[in-house]
Amino acid sequence: MAGLITALFGGRPGMISGAAGALAVVMVSLVAVHGVEYLFATVVLMGLMQTVVGVMRWGKFIRLVPHPVMLGFVNGLAIVIFLAQLGQFQVPGSAQSAGHGMANGQWLSGGPLALMLGLVALTMAIIWVMPRITSVVPAPLAGIGIVAAIAIGFGLDVPLVGDLASIEGGLPAFHVPLVPLTWETFEIILPYAFILAAIGLIESLLTVNLVGEMTGKRGGASQECIAQGAANTVTGFFGGMGGCAMIGQSMINVKSGGRTRIAGVAASLFLLAFILFARSLIEQIPLAALVGVMFMVVIGTFAWNSLTILRKVPRTDAFVTILVTIVTVATDLATAVVVGVIVSALAYAWNNATRIHARTYQTPEGAKVYQIQGPLFFGSADGFSELFQIEAVALKYEETGKRIQLRHLSHDCHQLLAKAGHLMVDSDDDPDYALAVDSGVKTGIIGGH
């Protein structure tokens, strides 16, 4: 349902949405303590929050995510996708039975491991070669279909999708969350709803940017917020866990040529058909084929050019890129992006705070002139004061009988300084500052894939 609604009304055609692991991590603690009905209520509130963000057009603030953060984001995403596939090289069910996650699962070895690796390599080779032969059949679909046919035709003993879990299900029914309509319930679900809404929007808006760079399209952030909010609100009333944009699936779809709303609609309807009617067929797909597809996604997602430009860009940019990559792998995508934006902002403030300097000279009339170079803001205020021989600029000069005259200020500065009363502002030759706007300017985020 989430995939269908966002495909129809989302801000970026070609994106795929659905239940996401980043959301599930937060939901586990809520369900464990309060039960699944509180989850449904939380998803409804989460959707309403996201809708408000879209209506208020706050989605545009995703533009504040700097370029180094985006590089670290896609690199960390690629590593996360890669690490997630390693569990498929274990005996199905062994990690769960061990009770301690993937690390204690029983790894494949010998012939089974060699067969698994061979099928993965075959899938990757088909995906690489297929576009050079024909574009009628998407390369990932061809890879999965051919490898599945080989495995079934030759009766190969390899792990299958059905070995992990059954995908059988039915149509959802309308369901109002069975929770008390009290202030106490609201206090319980509000923190979870806020965190889920933030994570969902960050991942969705970053996917909007990523897909936009791949398709050459811009905008649509606020519309995507509204679509995600509507999808989660509806899903919550049908017993769903909610969702957000699926970055890996969106990459596969766009790279395969699915760049219209039809692609997203088809993805959701095919998923529904698999659950209702084609369970037995899907569960016969070898896991190796899916791993091969995801490995190709990893190769296509990782910004390989970042490995060379890290030596050329400023150290702070390189540090932010590496930091976001590490935090993405260690925690989650949303946390990594927030950390990256904060560190980038602090680094920017520090760099600008150290750029302020002054050139001084005496006029024939005896006045001392300070020509200030660099930005003046809270971070450089102390450095600005240190440029003068008298510590507290305005008041101290006034106490000694001297007068300060400021020139070349904007009209906004005039209004602020007029309230101070200690400074004389000469407005005879003050310039009019304006913003240069060029709608044709486009900034690239990711290249060299």
Image (cartoon, helix red, strand yellow):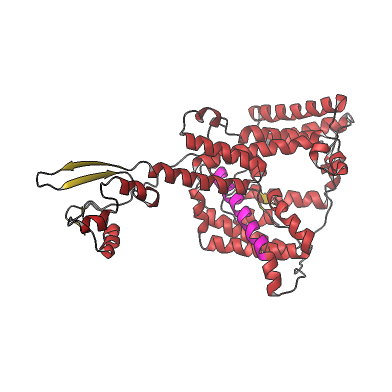
Q: What segment is highlighted magenta in the picture?
A: 190-211
Residue 104 place in picture, x, y as percent:
83, 37
With 247 as the anchor, is 53 left or right in this view?
Answer: left
The answer to whether residue 135 is visible is no
* The one of 371 and 70 positioned closer to us in this rendering: 371
Q: Which residue: 75% across, 55% down? A: 28
* The one of 301 and 272 positioned closer to us in this rendering: 301
Q: How many badges with numbers are in the image?
A: 0
- Residue 89 versus residue 333 in the image, above or below: above
With 407 as the anchor, is 46 left or right in this view?
Answer: right
Which quadrant does the N terminus fall into?
A: bottom right
Residue 400 place in picture, x, y as percent:
19, 56
Residue 405 part of the magenta-drawn span? no
With 356 as the anchor, is 144 left or right in this view?
Answer: right
Q: Which residue: 53% across, 39% down? A: 320
The answer to whether residue 38 is visible is yes
Give the overall secondary structure of the magenta segment.
helix
Give the image quarter of residue 299.
top right
Q: Which residue: 16% across, 55% down? A: 428
Residue 333 place in picture, x, y as percent:
63, 46
